[in-house]
Amino acid sequence: MTVIEVVQGDITRQDTDAIVNAANESLLGGGGVDGAIHWAAGPRLAEAGAAIAPCARGDAKATPSFDLPPPIRHVIHTVGPTWKGGDRGEPDTLASCYRRCLEVADELGARSVAFPAISTGIFAFPPDRAARIAIDTLRSTRTSVERIRLMAFDADSFRLLTAALATG
Ligand code: APR
């Protein structure tokens, strides 16, 4: 039985086995949550990312967590779609991110995973639609992960994710 919860806070400070990074194809780091995770994990994260890059949109690849605080052991990097209006396959690509991250988490034996709101920042995916896709995809994907934590970085995101989790 997989529990899905919504938590407001910084993904780099979570007590989960793995955290998901909303990355770009280079896996070298960037802004937003990508920047926060690379800052907390230290320079070895970009080195490890470069060794396995590129990561295609909708795919996911794992690295160690390096200097991130325990119990985080893995960073699962995924590259979400850039919003272009919604008729260029963005919803399917976003769903693929969540599905592939759970597949990678299962390969790692991770029992708990924290996700940021993939693509809803710099990639401009509408957060309400993204929340629905995230929850529907996570609910419909078979996984051994026991605890999925959806991270809200602000109060509005928390309200939106909580409402989406309560419906559908
Ligand atoms: N903890 C949790 N969530 C966070 C954090 C954090 N420390 N920092 C930002 N967020 C949230 C944002 O508020 C947003 O809701 O993560 C969500 C995703 O936003 P972005 O980080 O901008 O990611 P995304 O929209 O997927 O854009 C990815 O931005 O940083 C670059 O290299 C990255 O090119 C890639 C693009």
Image (tube, rainbow, N blue to C red):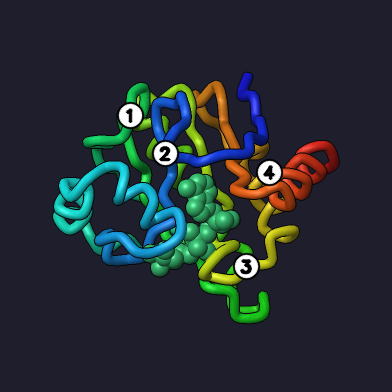
* SS for callout 4: helix
- The residue wearing badge 1 is 69
- The answer to whether marks 2 and 1 mark residues whose Cβ atoms lie closer than 8 Å is yes
Q: Is residue 22 above or below residue 168?
A: below
In primary-sequence order, the first of circles 4 and 3 is 3
Amino acid type at mark 4 = Ile
Residue at 71% x, 47% y: name it.
155
Q: Which of the two discs, 1 and 4, labels the residue nearer the N terminus? A: 1
Query: Which mark is first along the chain, 3 or 1?
Result: 1
What residue is at 45 percent from the left and 54 percent from the top?
33
Mark with earlier residue (3, 2): 2
**Kind of residue indicated by mark 3:** Phe
Q: Is mark 2 within 8 Å of ligand 1?
A: yes
Q: Is 96 placed left or right of 42 in the picture?
A: right
Query: Image check: 80 left or right of 48?
Result: right
Depth check: 106 or 33 in front?
33
List x then y, in percent, for residue 122.
Answer: 51, 69
Q: Label 4 vs label 2: CA separation? A: 21 Å
Q: Which residue is mark 4?
A: 135
Q: Is residue 77 above or below residue 120?
A: above
Disc tally is: 4
* Residue position for label 3: 125
Q: Taking the image as drawn, is residue 99 in sight?
A: no
Q: Position of residue 67 (x, y in %)?
A: 24, 35
Give the distance between the C-alpha atoms of the residues marked 4 and 3, in whole angstroms: 15 Å
| Residue 29 figure quarter | bottom left
